[in-house]
Amino acid sequence: MIHKTAMIDPSATIGENVSIGPFTMIGPDVEIGDGTQISSHVVINGPTKIGRNNQIYQYSSVGEVPQDMKYHGEKSFLEIGDNNIIREFCTVHRGTKLGGGMTRIGNNNLFMNYVHIAHDCIIGDNNTFANNSALSGHVTIKNYVGLAGFAAVHQFAVVGDHCYVAHTTMVVQDVLPYLLVYGDPAKPKGLNSVGLKRRGFTTDQIMAIKRAYKVIFRQGNTVADAITKLEAMVDEYPVIQLMVEGLRNSERGIARERHVDEAAEVA
């Protein structure tokens, strides 16, 4: 059902069984997939493509221009997959030329009240963003990640698969897969064991990840040494391949505890 007070641009494409509530505004170049439900007082601007069976709650702003001083009106995009829930007062911005022109959200994600997704973010599937969590521009969030309330991620950082970012944490470097991180700046506090068990990881798999964790964070290895040692373990423990890739592909460096000698050098 489309409410009579909803304002929909003629160029917008609305799928079947879409519900649009009172005083919602759908701008030009917006595509909304079948079965999506949009509450009252939502603003969606384009170019934006929204998939099937999403729920967008009141007072959310989706597909707005990016908050970036380098943006000068060039065409950019937002793509949202299927089965996402975007709760009240969320903001999701389109991409910029520097970031490839695209902000992309996958499937089956939950964004609670007041979540902010900035320009050029890439978000995978099955993630949960709690109230007031926020992503700066160019952030990548992989799959099955949990961001607790008021957690924030610095621009260009990557949060790996199956991580949990605790409340009020500030992520300024890449977070390797499977970790629980906490603090400002974020530091590893062990594995996201609860999440791994919930998702069906076996005891043997979790033990293998713990071994890899010790190689990276507890044995004084450099990143290069850790990669070499983990690569020798991958055939026996394939589950740690994601950690190897996270180390190898990191551009900002990884979140980790600083050693005493490192702290002294900074001082």
Image (tube, rainbow, N blue to C red):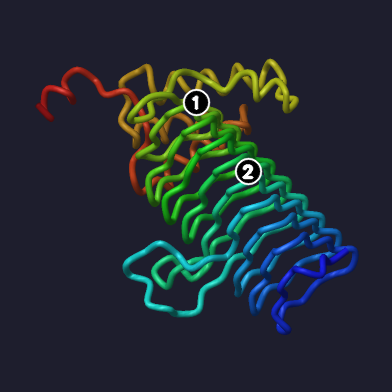
Residue 234 visible in image: no
Q: Residue sitting at 36 percent across and 39 percent down?
A: 173
State whether residue 71 is above or below residue 240: below
Residue 14: image location, x then y, percent:
80, 72
Placement of the C terminus among the 4 image quadrants: top left
Q: Residue sitting at 84 percent across and 66 percent down?
A: 2
Residue 72 visible in image: yes
Q: Which labelled disc corresponds to residue 249?
A: none
Placement of the N terminus among the 4 image quadrants: bottom right
Q: Amino acid at mark 2?
A: Phe
Q: Earlier in the sequence, mark 1 or mark 2?
A: 2
Provide the secondary structure element on which disc 1 rests.
loop
With 220 as the anchor, is 113 left or right in this view? right
Residue nearer the viewer, 185 or 90: 90
Q: Amino acid at mark 1?
A: Ala
Q: Which residue is mark 1?
A: 166
Q: Which residue is mark 2?
A: 111
Q: Residue furthest front?
A: 5
Q: Residue furthest bottom?
A: 10
Q: Residues within 10 Å of mark 2 (few under 14, many from 20)?
A: many
Provide the secondary structure element on which disc 2 rests.
strand
With 262 as the anchor, is 147 left or right in this view? right
With 221 as the anchor, is 167 left or right in this view? right
Q: Residue sitting at 58 percent across and 65 percent down?
A: 63
Q: Are marks 1 and 2 in contact (CB under 8 Å)?
A: no
With 36 as the anchor, is 85 left or right in this view? left
Q: What's the distance in space between the residues labelled 1 and 2, CA to CA?
A: 16 Å
Nearest-to-viewer mark from 1 and 2: 2
